[in-house]
Image (tube, rainbow, N blue to C red):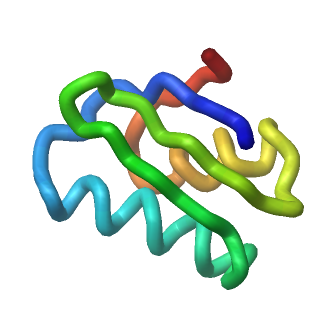
Amino acid sequence: MQTFNVQGMTCGHCVKAVTNAIKTDDPNAEVQVDLGKGEVSVQSVLGAEQVIGLITEEGYTAQVV
Protein backbone atom coordinates (compact mmCIF):
# COMPACT_ATOMS: atom_id res chain seq x y z
CA MET A 1 0.00 0.00 0.00
CA GLN A 2 1.39 3.38 -1.05
CA THR A 3 0.13 6.60 0.54
CA PHE A 4 0.21 9.97 -1.17
CA ASN A 5 -0.42 13.48 0.10
CA VAL A 6 -2.67 15.12 -2.50
CA GLN A 7 -3.18 18.89 -2.58
CA GLY A 8 -6.35 20.39 -4.04
CA MET A 9 -8.98 17.71 -3.36
CA THR A 10 -12.05 19.40 -1.89
CA CYS A 11 -15.12 17.34 -2.73
CA GLY A 12 -16.60 14.04 -3.85
CA HIS A 13 -15.96 14.90 -7.49
CA CYS A 14 -12.24 15.24 -6.70
CA VAL A 15 -12.26 11.82 -5.02
CA LYS A 16 -13.98 10.27 -8.04
CA ALA A 17 -11.58 11.93 -10.50
CA VAL A 18 -8.49 10.68 -8.67
CA THR A 19 -9.94 7.19 -8.15
CA ASN A 20 -11.01 6.85 -11.79
CA ALA A 21 -7.64 8.08 -13.07
CA ILE A 22 -5.81 5.35 -11.16
CA LYS A 23 -8.35 2.63 -11.97
CA THR A 24 -8.16 3.45 -15.68
CA ASP A 25 -4.52 2.33 -15.72
CA ASP A 26 -4.99 -0.48 -13.15
CA PRO A 27 -8.62 -1.68 -12.95
CA ASN A 28 -7.72 -3.95 -10.00
CA ALA A 29 -6.23 -1.15 -7.91
CA GLU A 30 -7.59 -0.51 -4.43
CA VAL A 31 -7.92 3.23 -3.87
CA GLN A 32 -8.85 4.75 -0.51
CA VAL A 33 -9.22 8.51 -0.20
CA ASP A 34 -9.23 10.43 3.08
CA LEU A 35 -10.52 13.82 1.95
CA GLY A 36 -10.02 15.39 5.39
CA LYS A 37 -6.33 14.46 5.53
CA GLY A 38 -5.78 14.97 1.81
CA GLU A 39 -4.39 11.45 1.52
CA VAL A 40 -4.83 8.78 -1.09
CA SER A 41 -3.79 5.20 -0.33
CA VAL A 42 -3.25 2.94 -3.31
CA GLN A 43 -2.67 -0.81 -3.58
CA SER A 44 -1.65 -1.31 -7.20
CA VAL A 45 0.83 -2.79 -9.64
CA LEU A 46 1.58 0.82 -10.66
CA GLY A 47 4.70 2.45 -9.29
CA ALA A 48 4.61 5.55 -7.12
CA GLU A 49 5.77 7.81 -9.95
CA GLN A 50 3.05 6.44 -12.24
CA VAL A 51 0.36 7.11 -9.62
CA ILE A 52 1.69 10.63 -9.01
CA GLY A 53 1.62 11.24 -12.77
CA LEU A 54 -2.00 10.11 -13.02
CA ILE A 55 -3.06 12.30 -10.09
CA THR A 56 -1.15 15.26 -11.56
CA GLU A 57 -2.94 14.81 -14.90
CA GLU A 58 -6.22 15.36 -13.03
CA GLY A 59 -4.95 18.74 -11.82
CA TYR A 60 -3.78 17.90 -8.30
CA THR A 61 -0.35 17.94 -6.69
CA ALA A 62 0.78 14.65 -5.15
CA GLN A 63 3.77 13.33 -3.26
CA VAL A 64 4.59 10.14 -1.40
CA VAL A 65 3.97 10.36 2.33
Q: x, y percentage for residue 36?
A: 20, 29
Q: Residue at x 45, y 64 (%)?
A: 19
Q: x, y percentage for residue 50?
A: 78, 49
Q: x, y percentage for residue 63?
A: 60, 22
Q: Is residue 13 left or right of residue 3?
A: left
Q: x, y percentage for residue 21?
A: 53, 68
Q: For this rendering, which residue is in front, 11 or 42?
A: 42
Q: Which image quarter is the C terminus in?
A: top right
Q: Residue at x 53, y 59 (%)?
A: 31
Q: For this rendering, which residue is in front, 49 or 32?
A: 32
Q: Which image quarter is the N terminus in?
A: top right
Q: Residue at x 35, y 65 (%)?
A: 17
Q: Above or below — where is 24 with respect to 6?
A: below
Q: For this rendering, which residue is in front, 3 or 6?
A: 3
Q: For this rendering, which residue is in front, 34 or 19?
A: 34
The image quarter containing residue 6 is top left
Q: Is residue 20 left or right of residue 52?
A: left
